[in-house]
């Protein structure tokens, strides 16, 4: 095959690639040379003869076949023709990702042929010779990854253009005058791409929603949701349906359940939580063992299959936790009231109940529907106070009620024993190869208008680990119970780490004086040692992030491969049905199998798993963007302040700097560093001064000041002030 051709002109030596492109786009239709000449707008004798010659060469090479005299078809499964997805860069070029190919294929801008980021495409690959970087050309866009985009509209006399802040969206969207609607110049809008004519530079679209003015708080939050296709409110018919559900506790329903209302029960949640998915019950048995119940809101009792409410919950698949609000999977009447395990209210639950001994070994287990009445609602801080002091009086500075109060001795004893058992389980899990990622979470103190007043970091303590271990136990045992029956089930799976990413991380962390020892013990042990070494250091957040990125992504699947990060052979999600649809499906399947029914259709549930994993990814991206937005908003009010930061990334266009005191990250452009002329040294992960040979490298501490805080792009730019000598 020849190299990529220029646009066809009379003196082209070969038209092979253009022929392949035409036949590939019409793989079931035979073409003769006249039809190909017409498509390429060639009408001279020389070009016609070249087309005839190239058709014969391609047929001889078995790239195409002569299906009938003078007519040709692309050969099925041609070695140069692949299907996969587009991965755009921020420089208007892309890579073609295909499982069949050993490496990603570079796609130059002029070969994208209207393909956008994450689109499914057919690509013709060339330059596949050894030592040459493979390149390709998009032959056909088979499926758009998305057709709705958020951007700012610029209105002209007879048309408009919408430009997006997404660096991977390389084109504006053309809006005809009659598709602008009520939008005003400069509005943030949601547009739908309707068409992209072959010879048009930009796709054609229409405004489908006006989100507001750029920079306004609600506008930007709604823009984040709209960018990922996530809803901001429930359809009115869904709200009405939910309001009509009978949420009263009925004696005839209680009679069908295991009655746990007299067993000591309490919840431990974040202090600002409103939806309480889970509760723990505790009872000491006559034989000296403990009966511990993990009680989960019985959402499936209210969320019936085939209803508009269930359809809406499935489409959402997850609640979305933005920096200033929650976009729930279920309407508030269920999420915050009927299903929420609030204290001193009888609630329907689905429970996993275990008999455990002093060594935290499970002696017996039981799964089924129950009814509970929680005795106490704790915030993590209150439970932590009990664990640390063993005191039954919660002081005013710890209390979430605003006043000191006394907890029963029974609850104190239960909390302390559960903490003991949780620590035993956690220690065993770590010994089995589980990986501990206690990454620091950035949180904001917001005023009544949602403006950031301060930044703080959420750190997991014993009370968090107590809840975590018992939720993990329930998830593991439910999955194990069904998995060993060899019946179709929904698992939460996590594959082994990506070795290439681990080795790449090794090169980065070496700059900070760390290494991963792959020779002694397992990878999980090596990563745990690294996490332990960086704990509390200025580079912790960077290295935690790199380590997490080296891991495979957890997802939902009916194909159980185990959970590498937790070191479990069986794992599922059973404990959060108010905010995760897979948990609802797990509840339904568990009850279905408890009723001794046969296995369900695996293909149907695998499709649902893929959908839920996809929606989880979109929600995670939206949550991350909302944090970036609030960080930029926070830094806007600190324009005149100097900050000490650590260099967290180095590129050819500048350095990324993470401010130590608040974890906000921004960029210092290479052109803005005035004390020398710097160039990027990829091997050293550093910028090198041409005159002084001074280095700016990963882990270096420097002082910076805000240069620009762009709320729309969620982007911070810093001035470089000086090194921290």
Image: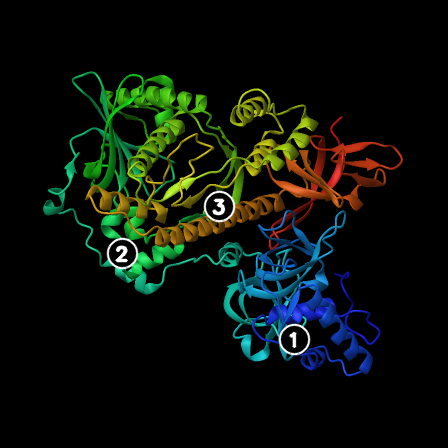
Dot label at residue 305:
2
Observer-side mark, 3 or 2, equals 2
698 up-or-down from 328: above or below: above
Q: Nearest the camera: 503 or 202? A: 503
Horizontal and vertical percent position of residue 557: 41, 45
**Which corner quadrant of the image does residue 423 belong to?**
top left
Horizontal and vertical percent position of residue 644: 67, 32
Quick one: SS at disc 1? loop
Residue that numbered label 3 is attached to? 323
Q: Look at the numbered discs 3 and 2 and tell me whether their residues touch, using CB distance below 8 Å.
A: no
Q: Nearest the camera: 502 or 370? A: 502
- Residue 374: in sight, yes or no? yes
Other residues around mark 3 within 10 Å, as few (<14) / some (14–19) / many (≥20): many
The answer to whether residue 648 is left or right of residue 193 is right
Q: Which residue is drawn at 62% across and 57% down?
A: 165
> Mark 3 or 2 closer to N-term?
2
Residue that numbered label 1 is attached to? 156
The answer to whether residue 507 is left or right of residue 274 is right
Disc count in the image? 3
Distance (Cα) linking label 1 and label 2: 49 Å
Horizontal and vertical percent position of residue 561: 43, 38
**Which corner quadrant of the image does residue 15 belong to?**
bottom right
Q: How is the image coloured?
A: rainbow
What is the quadrant of the N terminus in the image? bottom right
Quick one: SS at disc 3? loop
> Mark 1 or 2 closer to N-term?
1
């Amino acid at each position: 095959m020849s190299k990529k051709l220029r646009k066809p002109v009379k003196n082209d030596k070969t038209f092979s690639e253009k022929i392949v492109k035409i036949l590939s786009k019409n793989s079931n239709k035979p073409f003769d040379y006249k039809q190909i000449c017409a498509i390429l707008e060639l009408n001279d004798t020389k070009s016609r003869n070249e087309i005839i010659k190239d058709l014969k060469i391609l047929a001889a090479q078995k790239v195409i076949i002569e299906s009938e005299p003078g007519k040709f078809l692309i050969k099925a499964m041609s070695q140069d023709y692949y299907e996969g997805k587009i991965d755009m860069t921020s420089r208007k070029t892309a890579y073609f990702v295909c499982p069949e190919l050993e490496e990603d294929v570079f796609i130059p801008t002029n070969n994208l042929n209207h393909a956008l980021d994450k689109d499914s495409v057919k690509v013709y690959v060339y330059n596949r010779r050894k030592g040459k970087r493979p390149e390709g050309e998009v032959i056909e866009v088979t499926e758009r990854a998305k057709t709705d985009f958020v951007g700012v509209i610029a209105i002209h006399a007879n048309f408009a253009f919408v430009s997006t802040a997404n660096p991977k969206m390389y084109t504006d969207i053309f809006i005809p005058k009659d598709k602008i609607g009520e939008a005003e110049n400069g509005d943030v809008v949601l547009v739908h791409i309707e068409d992209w004519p072959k010879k048009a530079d930009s796709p054609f679209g229409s405004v489908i929603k006006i989100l507001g003015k750029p920079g306004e708080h609600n506008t930007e939050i709604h823009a984040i949701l709209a960018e990922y296709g996530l809803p901001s409110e429930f359809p009115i018919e869904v709200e009405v349906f939910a309001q009509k559900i009978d949420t009263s506790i009925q004696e005839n329903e209680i009679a069908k359940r295991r009655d746990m209302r007299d067993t000591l029960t309490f919840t431990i949640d974040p202090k600002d939580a409103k939806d309480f998915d889970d509760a723990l019950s505790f009872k000491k048995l006559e034989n000296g063992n403990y009966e511990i119940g993990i009680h989960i809101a019985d959402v499936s009792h209210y969320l019936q299959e085939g209803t508009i409410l269930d359809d809406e919950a499935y489409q959402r698949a997850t609640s979305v936790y933005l920096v200033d609000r929650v976009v729930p999977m279920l309407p508030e009447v269920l999420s915050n009231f009927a299903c929420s395990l609030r204290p001193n209210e009888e609630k329907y639950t689905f429970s996993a109940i275990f008999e455990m001994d002093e060594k935290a070994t499970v002696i017996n287990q039981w799964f089924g529907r129950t009814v509970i009445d929680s005795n106490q609602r704790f915030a993590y801080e209150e439970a932590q106070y009990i664990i640390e002091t063993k005191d039954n009086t919660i002081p005013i500075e710890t209390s979430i009620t605003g006043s000191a109060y006394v907890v029963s001795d029974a609850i104190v004893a239960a909390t302390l024993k559960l903490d003991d058992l949780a620590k035993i389980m956690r220690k065993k899990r770590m010994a089995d190869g589980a990986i501990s990622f206690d990454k620091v979470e950035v949180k904001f103190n917001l005023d009544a208008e949602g403006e950031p007043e301060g930044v703080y970091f959420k750190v997991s303590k014993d009370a968090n680990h107590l809840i975590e271990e018992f939720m993990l136990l329930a998830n593991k045992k439910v999955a194990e119970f069904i998995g060993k029956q060899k019946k179709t089930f929904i698992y939460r799976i996590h594959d082994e780490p990506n070795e290439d990413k681990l080795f790449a991380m090794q090169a980065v962390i070496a700059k900070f004086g760390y290494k991963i020892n792959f020779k002694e013990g397992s990878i999980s042990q090596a990563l745990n040692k690294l996490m332990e070494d960086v704990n509390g250091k200025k580079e912790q957040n960077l290295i935690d992030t790199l380590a997490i990125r080296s891991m495979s992504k957890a997802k939902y699947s009916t194909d159980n491969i185990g959970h590498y990060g937790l070191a479990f052979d069986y794992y599922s999600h059973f404990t959060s049905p108010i905010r995760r649809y897979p948990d609802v499906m797990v509840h339904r399947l568990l009850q279905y199998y408890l009723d001794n029914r046969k296995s369900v259709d695996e293909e149907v549930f695998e499709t649902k798993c893929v959908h839920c994993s996809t929606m989880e990814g979109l929600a995670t991206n939206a949550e991350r963007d909302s944090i970036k937005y609030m960080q930029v908003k926070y830094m806007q009010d600190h324009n005149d302040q100097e900050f000490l930061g650590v260099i967290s990334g180095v590129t050819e266009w500048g350095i990324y700097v993470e401010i130590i005191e608040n974890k906000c990250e921004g960029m210092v452009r290479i052109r803005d560093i005035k004390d020398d002329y710097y160039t990027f040294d990829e091997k050293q992960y550093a910028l090198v001064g041409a005159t002084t040979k001074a280095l700016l490298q990963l882990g270096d501490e420097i002082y910076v000041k805000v240069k620009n805080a762009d709320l729309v792009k969620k982007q911070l730019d810093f001035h470089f002030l000086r090194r921290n000598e």
